[in-house]
């Protein structure tokens, strides 16, 4: 749901009634991953997508039904060779959808969703506050759709339990809320969206409850070192992919905002000094385009020791071999050197700055999503990769 946060936040502020359908699970060659959402307001306006077109019409109808009935439902869509008229995914995958009505007069769920949408909309700024939205996507019908908004410090808004009286019921609700907060904080730290199975009383036993945890985090960073023409093209495609882009170069005559209008910031500083002083995380990509040893070596010596998602460096194969020799002399071991993508990018036959930027961006996406970079034509590999395979690389499991 947080992938359409900005528009849904506006709907909340305008006081619209709406229903939102969210992908809970995706199996096989499903086009959208958990967290992807489609919302429909009372006037019939639709935003977002849950399937790239395959089942949008059916999900649209479910949202309208939810607005009429006020009931939260979970539906599954797959593909049937036997029934040519069945609504399903022609790609052969299966998705489960949670459809939740969010009327303007809802005093329990809507404030939590509105706060989550606000946090997600603000996270479009690199200084936005992280938050995680937890919803019950499977389990007892009376709990379906309940929500919590969880902050990194463990504070939260809302509750997953039913509005019931009694000490035992309150204790179960408190236990479930505490478990949800713990699970959400772990996923939020990794910037991931995922489902988690817990017990209805907060434990791992008892009646199962499926929690859908959506992380709203600031956009990942792309730091481009070297204020050259290739950097301008890479900044443009980096913004297109949703990165917060920084261009850094020690030469003030080249590192100007006028030369790099697509960058979020342009920094005049020696690259290694800037890297020492700035914040990076497991989603950060570092693109070294300087191909000058006096900049490259002290920068890469630091970069390859950091827990970032991608480090790539431009240069010829001869430059690469010389670079490896210098880095070994600087004390880097083979495991650290193996993380270096050099020469940077995939083999697309690129010549122009734009083509080269596409080559670099393609390698970043392949590394992030676990892709091979080979043509899909004739290849017996999945089109949509299991995002959990890239968790160990520090990449998130949702749209940034």
Image (spheres, helix red, strand yellow):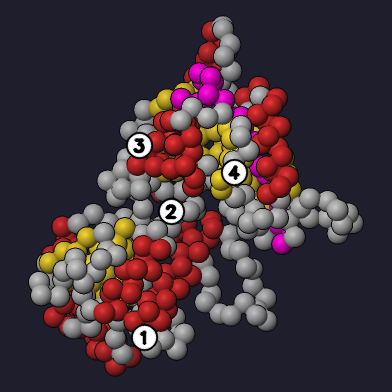
Residue reaching furthest to the bottom: 318
- Identify the secondary structure beneath mark 4: strand
Image mark for residue 152: 3
Q: Residue 166, percent across and down?
A: 56, 6
Pinpoint residue 289: horizontal percent, then vertical percent.
Answer: 26, 78
Is 208 within the magenta? Answer: no
How crowded pointer 2 is (Cα within 10 Å; few <14, some 14-19, many 20+) is rated as: many
Q: Which mark is residue 400?
A: 2
User: SS at mark 2?
Assistant: loop
Kindly report which numbered mark, 2 or 1, lies closer to the viewer in this rendering. 1
Residue at x-position 37% and y-position 79%: 354
Contact? badges 3 and 1 (CB < 8 Å):
no
- Which comes before the other along the chain, label 4 or label 1? 4
For the point 35% across and 56% down, the residue is 220
| Crowding near the residue tagged with mark 3, few <14, some 14–19, many ≥20 C-alpha atoms within 10 Å | some
**Mark number for residue 217?**
none
The answer to whether one can see residue 126 in this image is yes
Characterize the local packing of mark 1: few (<14), some (14-19) or many (20 or more) Cα atoms within 10 angstroms. Answer: few
Find disc 1 in the rendering and name its residue: 352
Mark 3–mark 1 distance (CA, rounded to whole Å): 43 Å
Q: CA distance from mark 4 to mark 1?
A: 40 Å
- Looking at the image, tell me whether mark 2 or mark 1 is earlier in sequence order: 1
Marks 2 and 3, how far apart in space?
18 Å
Residue positioned most to the left:
252
Q: Which segment is the magenta one? A: 91-111
Task: Say which residue label 4 marks.
Answer: 46
């Amino acid at each position: 749901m947080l992938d359409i946060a900005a528009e849904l936040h506006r709907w909340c502020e305008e006081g619209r009634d709406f229903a939102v359908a969210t992908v809970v699970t995706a199996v096989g060659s499903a086009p959208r991953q958990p967290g992807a959402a489609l919302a429909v307001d009372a006037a019939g306006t639709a935003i977002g997508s849950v399937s790239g077109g395959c089942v949008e019409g059916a999900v649209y109808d479910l949202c309208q039904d939810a607005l009429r009935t006020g009931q939260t439902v979970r539906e599954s869509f797959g593909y049937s060779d036997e029934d040519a008229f069945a609504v399903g995914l022609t790609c052969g995958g299966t998705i489960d959808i949670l459809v939740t009505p969010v009327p303007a007069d809802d005093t329990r769920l809507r404030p939590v969703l509105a706060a989550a949408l606000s946090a997600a909309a603000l996270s479009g700024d690199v200084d936005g506050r992280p938050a995680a939205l937890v919803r019950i996507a499977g389990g007892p019908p009376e709990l379906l759709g309940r929500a919590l908004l969880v902050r990194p410090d463990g504070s939260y808004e809302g509750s997953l339990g039913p509005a019931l009286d009694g000490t035992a019921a309150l204790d179960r609700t408190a236990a479930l809320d505490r478990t949800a907060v713990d699970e959400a904080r772990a996923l939020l730290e990794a910037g991931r969206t995922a489902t988690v199975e817990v017990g209805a009383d907060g434990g791992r036993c008892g009646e199962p409850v499926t929690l859908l945890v959506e992380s709203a985090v600031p956009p990942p960073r792309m730091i481009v070192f070297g204020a050259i023409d290739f950097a301008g093209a890479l900044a443009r495609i980096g913004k297109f992919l949703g990165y917060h882009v920084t261009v850094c170069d020690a030469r003030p005559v080249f590192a100007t905002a006028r030369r790099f209008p697509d960058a979020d910031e342009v920094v005049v500083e020696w690259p290694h000094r800037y890297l020492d002083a700035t914040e990076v995380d497991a989603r950060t990509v570092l693109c070294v385009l300087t191909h000058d040893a006096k900049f490259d070596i002290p920068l890469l010596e630091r970069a390859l020791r950091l827990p970032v998602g991608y480090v790539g460096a431009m240069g010829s194969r001869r430059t690469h071999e010389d670079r490896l020799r210098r880095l070994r002399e600087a004390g880097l071991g083979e495991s650290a050197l193996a993380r270096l993508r050099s020469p940077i990018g995939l083999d697309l036959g690129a010549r122009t700055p734009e083509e080269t930027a596409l080559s670099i961006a393609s390698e970043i996406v392949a590394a992030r999503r676990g892709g091979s970079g080979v043509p899909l034509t004739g290849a017996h590999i999945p089109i949509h990769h299991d995002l959990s395979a890239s968790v160990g690389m520090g990449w998130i499991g949702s749209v940034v």
